Amino acid sequence: MTEALSLFHTEEKSLNEFKEMVKSDAISKRSLVRFIDNYDDLITQSKVITRVSDRLQSKLNKANEQIAAQNATISDNNKLLHNTIEQLVKAKVSKKASTIILTAAVVLFVAEEVLLEEAINSYVDIPYIGLIVKLCIALTLKAFESTIEKFFMRREHSKIVEEGLWEELEVSSPHSPGLITSEAVPR
Amino acid sequence: MERIHIQATEFTPHITFDPSNGLIELKGNSTPHNSLKFYHKMIVNLEEYAIRGTKDLTANVAFRYFNTSSSKCLYDMFKQLDKIKKKGRQVTINWYYSPSDEDMYEVGKDFSELMNLNFNFIELAA
């Protein structure tokens, strides 16, 4: 029943009754007084509802400002977190690559010293050939180090993407927060 | 007159109307899809109480937010409370608000001033 009723059903009913009285020329002083009372009540209602709505709109505006500020903070923190993770991954990968290169260098230097240098010396007679070969090995390994770093970096990134960490960070830091509505006011 | 007890939801307030103890409680958010449908029973009961009620009434109101159509329904309820008061029964309206929610305090002031009703303004514990 209430679904069919308007929010202002009482006021509409009074107005319709008065219209009927006007139509039938049956307006008494009493009905006029009642009409004035109803009109007076409507003015009070309008004043109350307008003022209350303005206050609550101001509350919503404040809540929206608060949410926008919080979103900006979350976004900044996420950027910071993103950068920190990136640096941590870089440090981890760099350490790993250095360990591999160092191990390879030791193995190659020992192999050069024990096996290669003697073989080379038996063919050519160049002074400091062992040192030159070691320098070549070191330069090659240095170039190889950045390749290894890039490889591990790519692998770490795809691992993070698989875990969904980046997506979560991106989702939790909306750059353009929407306005909240009355139905989403902070509890 | 029947006792009304409605649990609060995300969009509707907790409502209690206990005519035998003269107690009304409204608490929470009020943004129902159809405010009149939600408050109609309460308004009708208060109209009936204005005619047949015998006890003094205490209304504890603690809203966090309500929409415009709810404010119209609140207006209608307060009007009924005013009627009950004019019939000689004591009506106490306690308007609770959070200390950080100045707007809700002002809303209570607006109702009180424009409707010529006496509200007790009570700050909720932070």
Image (cartoon, grey):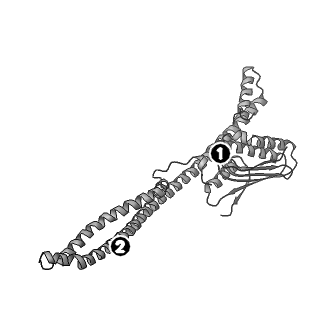
- Expressed as whole percent of the image width and height from the top left, the position of residue A110 reads 27, 78
Where is the N terminus of chain A found, in terms of image quarters?
top right
Q: Residues within 10 Å of mark 2 (few under 14, many from 20)?
A: few
Q: Circle 1 sits in a helix, a strand or a loop, which is it?
A: loop
Q: Residue shown at 85%/53% (left/top)?
A: B21
- Snapshot quadrant of residue A115: bottom left
Query: Residue beneath label 1, please?
Result: B31
Q: Are marks 1 and 2 in contact (CB under 8 Å)?
A: no
Q: Nearer the viewer, mark 1 or mark 2?
A: 2
* Image coordinates for residue A133, horizontal then vertical, percent: 19, 74
Q: Is disc 1 in the same subunit as disc 2?
A: no
- The amino acid at mark 1 is Thr
Q: Is residue A123 left or right of residue A51?
A: left
Q: Position of residue A50 (x, y in %)?
A: 62, 43
Chain on which label 1 sits = B
Residue A99: numbered disc? 2
Residue in the image at 58% along x and 48% along y: A57
Residue A22 is situated, as x and y percent measured from the top left of the image, at 72, 23
Query: Is residue A158 among what the camera can see?
Result: yes
Which residue is rendered at x = 61% and y = 47% of the image? A183
Amino acid at circle 2 = Thr
